[in-house]
Amino acid sequence: MISINKTIVSASLLACDFSSLAYESERCAKAGVDWIHFDVMDGHFVEQITYGSAVLKSIDKVTDKFMDVHLMVDNPERQIPLFARAGADLIDVHVESSRDIFGCLEEIRAFGIKSAVAVKPNTPVEEAFKYLPLCDMVLVMTVEPGYGGQSFMTNMLPKITKLREYADKNGFSDLDIQVDGGVNVRTAKLARKAGANVLVAGTGLFGAADMNAVCAALKGI
Ligand code: DX5
Ligand code: ZN
């Protein structure tokens, strides 16, 4: 029996209309999402470049939603203070992006915000186990990081279950497990069953005819 944590829905702004970031942030907040997922890409760790802490600072002024910052950058150490001061409520660093993940997590927590590690599809989930004492959450990527609108990788489901079972057995039963990439109502059901409880949706929400209905459906899973 794995622990069942509360379902949290986090809207990825990567899928929104960037010419109306304030409006889109308010729109998803009104639709009932719990968190806003802020995908930071530097053109090195992943191919695309998205937005930085200056943009987060502006968005943080127009919404009081929990800001879930996903750093897909080389040398995340340099970005942590910038995003923490710009309004991040959680910062997530990829285990593949730094030689000092423990230092990154300690730095994030020193700002009094939540900390998380992320693992890419080809990274074994065991890579995250040693960091759990310093993590509020682990992000299991269900697509290759870098782009929205990709299909959910169902071969990631056993990784989620292995992580949830390890966390339950080793005193981390309140760990949040986030899935990110290709999440919709169908794939979210699979992810929840596997043990994830934080659902990041970009295209699934911003591409929906009725964002409110999709958000309600995701929250009900
Ligand atoms: C991809 C990002 C994801 C992505 C999710 O690198 O980390 O957050 O934006 O978008 P969808 O839900 O469209 O796959
Ligand atoms: Zn993301």
Image (spheres, rainbow, N blue to C red):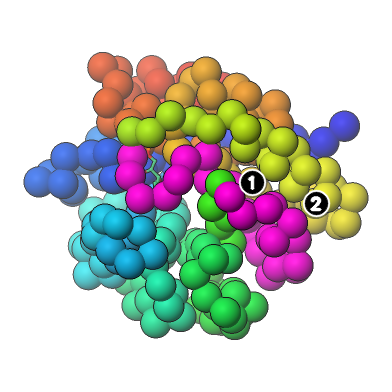
Is 161 left, or right, of 214 in this rendering?
right
**Residue at (76%, 67%) from the top-left corner?**
130
Disc assigned to residue 167? 2
Q: Is residue 58 left or right of residue 31?
A: left
* Residue displayed at 75% across by 61% down: 129
In the rendered view, tell whether residue 6 sits above or below residue 46.
above
Asked whether disc 2 touches disc 1, contact meaning CB atoms under 8 Å apart, the reply is yes
Judge whether 4 appears above or below 130 on screen.
above
Q: Residue 124: within the magenta?
A: yes
Q: Quadrant of the C terminus?
A: top right
User: What is the x, y in percent for residue 202?
Assistant: 35, 36
Visible residue check, residue 216: yes
| Residue 30 in picture, x, y percent from top left | 31, 34
Asked if the magenta segment contains residue 111, the reply would be no
- In magenta, the rendered stretch is 122-148
Amino acid carrying label 1: it is Ile
Query: Which image quadrant is residue 40 in?
Result: bottom left
Query: Which numbered marker is on residue 177?
Result: 1
- Pick the front one: 15 or 27: 15
Total numbered circles: 2
Question: Reading the chain from its start, which is encountered first: label 2 or label 1?
Answer: 2
Relative to 9, is 160 on the left or the right? right
Q: CA distance from mark 2 to mark 1?
A: 10 Å
Amino acid marked by disc 2: Ala
Residue at horizontal 69 percent and vertical 61 percent from the top: 127
Q: Residue furthest front?
A: 122
